[in-house]
Image (spheres, grey):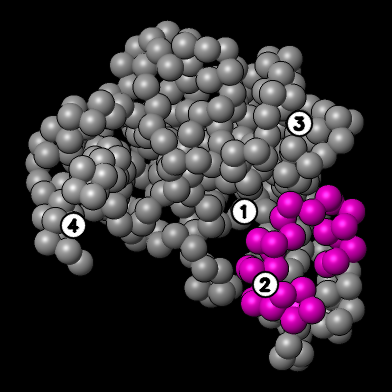
């Protein structure tokens, strides 16, 4: 670690310092995006639940404003301050997000929104990248996927995510044949979703649910018909299953180019008041009112497990460091 970096990592954990940095960098609110939480008994890797408990305790101690995603959108729409606002979201609707993370968020009275793949919660599918992981875990073949460029299941999933859905499904079928591993119809426990019953009882404890499509395709790669169906049906199903669905869409994968004007227009027509992506950035008061498109392209930071990293992020220190690097260069 360089001297400068060590200085910042230390300084950012001192009381008052994150606020000074936020002031200097003009940073207001942050929306975090988390994925799975670790369940060692089932071999599920993910965020450390104890680290989440520490982070939420610290954020409460430092009096950060832990608000719901819906409140954040309302504030931004009204031009109210987003200073020190921190929002938590989790993607896809895995069981661990409810059963491991859910009680910890509830313990700290911290709102959290889960972007639910509604076909997954319905039990009608399991997620395609998990099927690839399952094949790799259960095969005896040492060189599996070599013809596809090699690497582990993650590399393959990464390379295949931009394929049209039919091609991707065909490749997963081929891979399962090559691996001599049959993909079970029913999702194995460690890859399972929350059930709707669990979602409803979590909703009573402060968790909320937003639409994240039916099957998790990269929307910009879908036909007009599929895009329409993926977005409107997931919102309709959510409305039937939970009592207060969050009217904000979560774009699957959420990189620049994974969604665009068509998806934003669909979300607007559906009556949703915004959408979030998966690109790091901060959120500010009035930003949604600046242009109509802004509401349908709201950034989220990947949630880091460590408190010093969380503080670097919410203070805007990351931005300041790259500025310093460019000044030094
Ligand atoms: Zn997702």
How far separated are the C-alphas under marks 1 and 3?
19 Å
Pointer 2: what residue?
153
Residue 201 vs residue 110, the one in the foreground: 110
Q: Is residue 269 above or below residue 45?
A: above
Instruction: Please tell me whether residue 43 is drawn above or below residue 170 in the rendered image.
Output: below
Nearer the viewer's eye, disc 1 or disc 4? 4
**Which of the numbered marks, if any, corresponds to residue 231?**
3
Quarter holding residue 284: top left
Residue 60: % across, % down: 24, 39
Q: Are marks 2 and 1 in contact (CB under 8 Å)?
A: no
- Residue 5's disc is 4
Q: Alpha-carbon distance for marks 2 and 3? A: 28 Å
Identify residue for label 1: 94
Q: CA distance from mark 4 to mark 3?
A: 43 Å
Residue 44 percent across, percent down from the top left = 56, 69
Residue at the (26%, 44%) spot, across then down: 326
- Mark closer to the chain start, 1 or 4: 4
Q: Which residues are magenta?
A: 145-172
């Amino acid at each position: 670690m360089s001297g400068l970096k060590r200085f910042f990592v230390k300084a950012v954990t001192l009381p008052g310092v994150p606020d000074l940095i936020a002031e200097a960098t003009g940073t207001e609110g942050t929306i975090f995006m988390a994925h799975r939480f670790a369940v060692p008994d089932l071999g599920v890797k993910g965020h450390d639940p104890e680290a989440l408990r520490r982070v939420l305790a610290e954020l409460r101690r430092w009096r950060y404003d832990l608000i719901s995603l819906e409140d954040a959108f309302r504030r931004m729409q009204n031009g109210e301050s987003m200073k020190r606002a921190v929002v938590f979201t989790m993607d896809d609707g895995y069981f661990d997000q409810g059963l491991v993370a859910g009680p910890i968020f509830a313990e700290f009275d911290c709102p959290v929104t889960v972007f639910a793949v509604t076909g997954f919660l319905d039990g009608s599918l399991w997620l395609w990248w998990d099927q690839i992981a399952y094949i790799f875990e259960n095969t005896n073949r040492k060189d599996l996927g070599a013809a596809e460029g090699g690497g582990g299941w993650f590399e393959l999933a990464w390379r295949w995510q931009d394929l049209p859905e039919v091609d991707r499904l065909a490749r997963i079928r081929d891979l399962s044949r090559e691996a001599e591993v049959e993909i079970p119809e029913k999702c194995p426990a460690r890859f399972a979703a929350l059930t709707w019953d669990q979602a409803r009882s979590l909703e009573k404890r402060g968790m909320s649910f937003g639409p994240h499509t039916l099957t998790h395709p990269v929307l910009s790669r879908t036909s007009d018909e599929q895009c329409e169906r993926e977005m409107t049906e997931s919102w309709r199903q959510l409305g039937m299953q939970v009592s207060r669905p969050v009217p904000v869409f979560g774009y699957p994968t959420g990189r620049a180019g994974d969604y665009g004007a068509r998806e934003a227009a669909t979300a607007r027509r559906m009556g949703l008041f915004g959408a979030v992506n998966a690109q790091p950035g901060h959120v500010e008061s009035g930003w949604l009112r600046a242009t109509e498109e802004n509401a349908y392209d709201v950034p989220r930071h990947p949630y880091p497990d460590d408190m010093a990293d969380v503080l670097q992020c919410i203070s805007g220190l990351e931005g300041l460091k790259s500025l310093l690097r460019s000044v030094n260069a």
